[in-house]
Image (spheres, rainbow, N blue to C red):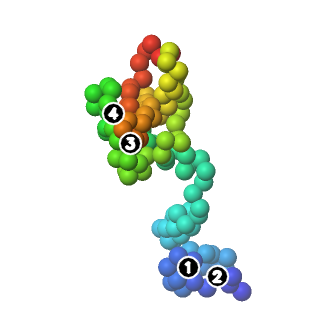
Amino acid sequence: MRLYKECLHCGKELEGRKDKKFCDPQCKSSYQYQKEKNRPERFYNKVDNQLKLNRKILKEYNKGGKVTVRAEVLLELGFDPKFFTHYWKNQKDDVYLFVYEYGFLTRKENGKEKYVLVIWQDYMN
């Protein structure tokens, strides 16, 4: 007695072994890909993806080494300041949060939140 009468991916009738689930390797691969794609994203992937996005955004907006940008501009692009890799505190006790080599400091100027963007320097070690 056959357990599966049709391919789990494409629905085509199966021939051969009675425990066969897929008609060919491509259907098996496609089925596994779709199954994995529909699974909830793992915590590690969420964090890693957000760090990559944050780094990309900081890199894009910091062409000059030190730049000030309105927070809303970065936030609209998906930047999340809660995701960072390390921090550095200067002599004034300002804490710069870094995403790898790109850092940011939150500032309020004229009632608007802004980020001061910097790039990691050797003296920060």
Q: Which quadrant of the figure has residue 53?
A: top left
Residue at screen point 49% across, 41% down: 81
Q: Viewer-proximal residue, 28 or 53?
A: 53
Query: Regarding mark 3 in the picture, which secondary structure is present there?
Result: strand
Amino acid carrying label 1: it is Cys
Do the CB atoms of the residues marked 1 and 3 lie less than 8 Å apart?
no
Q: Check if mark 3's residue and mark 2's residue have beta carbons within 8 Å.
A: no
The residue at which mark 1 appears reads as 7
Q: In the image, what residue type sits under mark 4?
A: Thr
Q: CA distance from mark 4 to mark 1?
A: 57 Å
Q: In the visual, does 55 lie left or right of 12?
A: left
Indicate which disc, 4 or 1, sits on the residue closer to the N terminus: 1
Mark 4 vs 2, N-terminal side = 2
The residue identified by callout 3 is 112
User: Residue at label 4?
Assistant: 68
Work out which residue is located at the far left of the displayed protein and give it.
Answer: 64
Q: Image height check: is 91 above or below 13?
A: above
- How packed mark 4 is, by other alpha carbons closer than 10 Å (few <14, some 14-19, many 20 or more), is some
Q: Indicate the position of residue 51 as horizontal and vertical percent values.
A: 49, 42
Q: CA distance from mark 3 to mark 2?
A: 62 Å
- What label sits on residue 4 in the rendered view? 2
Determine the secondary structure under disc 2: loop
The reply to whether dot 1 and dot 2 touch (C-beta < 8 Å) is yes
